[in-house]
Amino acid sequence: MPKRSPIAASALESKDMPRDGKIEVAFMGRSNSGKSSLINRLVGAKIAHTSSTPGRTQRINFFPMKGWYIVDLPGFGYAKVSMAQRERFGQAVEAYLTTRQPLIGGILIQDVRRDPQEEEMMVKRWAYDRNLYLAVVASKVDKLNQTERRERKARLEELYQGAVFLVSNRTGEGMDQVKNAIQGLGLTL
Ligand SMILES: Nc1nc2c(ncn2[C@@H]2O[C@H](COP(=O)(O)OP(=O)(O)O)[C@@H](O)[C@H]2O)c(=O)[nH]1
Ligand SMILES: [Mg+2]
């Protein structure tokens, strides 16, 4: 994999975000859910920082694509940062999700073995309220056997009340579904 492509912007406040009006798709998920790995897989390059230490992504990062941006949002549910820090990320993310004009949709990533919690449901509600596209992606499917996969897919689709794509960032399984969803928005990877 190529090492890194430049980040166009890394911001907490809207004044530091791109102003070129290009479309944005936000990648969201709990820390350690596999968000950075998914971004890297989709792009085919190590642009997002992956780590076994959760909570590394603390700013909103904009990765330039062909005429649009992948926006890597800080992972939610990370306990080891201070309350003040958490507040700050939370507010920045909320402000971004509720008001950002170039934003047309999101990819919500979660570990296939977990059930969605309050934060995931908030993301789902946010997308619904703004009438934005949302793809729900369940990662780490390589950790499950075929029976477990079927069970988890059914359970997650019931909880989310919609389609859930099962993927492995390790093997690449299921990646085409995510690519198709992005291409379905008229965007090129
Ligand atoms: N087995 C497996 N491990 C994964 C997968 N996706 C991510 N990981 C691992 O989970 C950890 C967190 O991944 P990362 O992409 O940094 O998650 P982030 O915190 O959500 O950005 C790392 O150790 C990854 O190697 C996957 O699909 N399968
Ligand atoms: Mg990350």
Image (cartoon, rainbow, N blue to C red):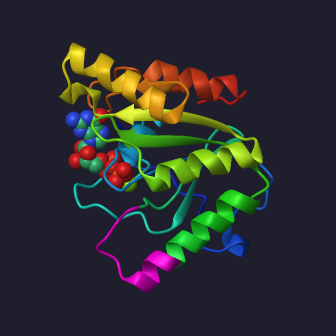
The quadrant where residue 30 appears: bottom left
Is residue 181 found left or right of 146 in the rendered image? right
Specify the segment rendered in magenta.
Answer: 77-87
Q: Residue furthest top?
A: 146
| Quarter of the figure that contains the N terminus | top left
Image-quarter location of ligand 2: bottom left
Q: Position of residue 113 (x, y in %)?
A: 27, 36
Q: Residue furthest bottom?
A: 84
Q: Position of residue 87 (x, y in %)?
A: 50, 78
Residue at 55%, 27% (x, y): give it: 162
Residue 24 is one of the magenta-drawn residues: no
Residue at 45%, 25% (x, y): give it: 165
Q: Nearer the viewer, residue 36 or 66?
A: 36
Is residue 5 found left or right of 66 in the rendered image? left
Q: Position of residue 12 (x, y in %)?
A: 59, 73
Q: Is residue 66 above or below residue 61?
A: above
Q: Nearer the viewer, residue 183 or 121?
A: 121
Q: Is residue 88 above or below residue 137?
A: below
Residue at 31%, 70% (x, y): give it: 79
Q: Nearer the viewer, residue 31 or 186?
A: 31
Q: Is residue 164 above or below residue 176?
A: below
| Quarter of the figure that contains the C terminus | top right
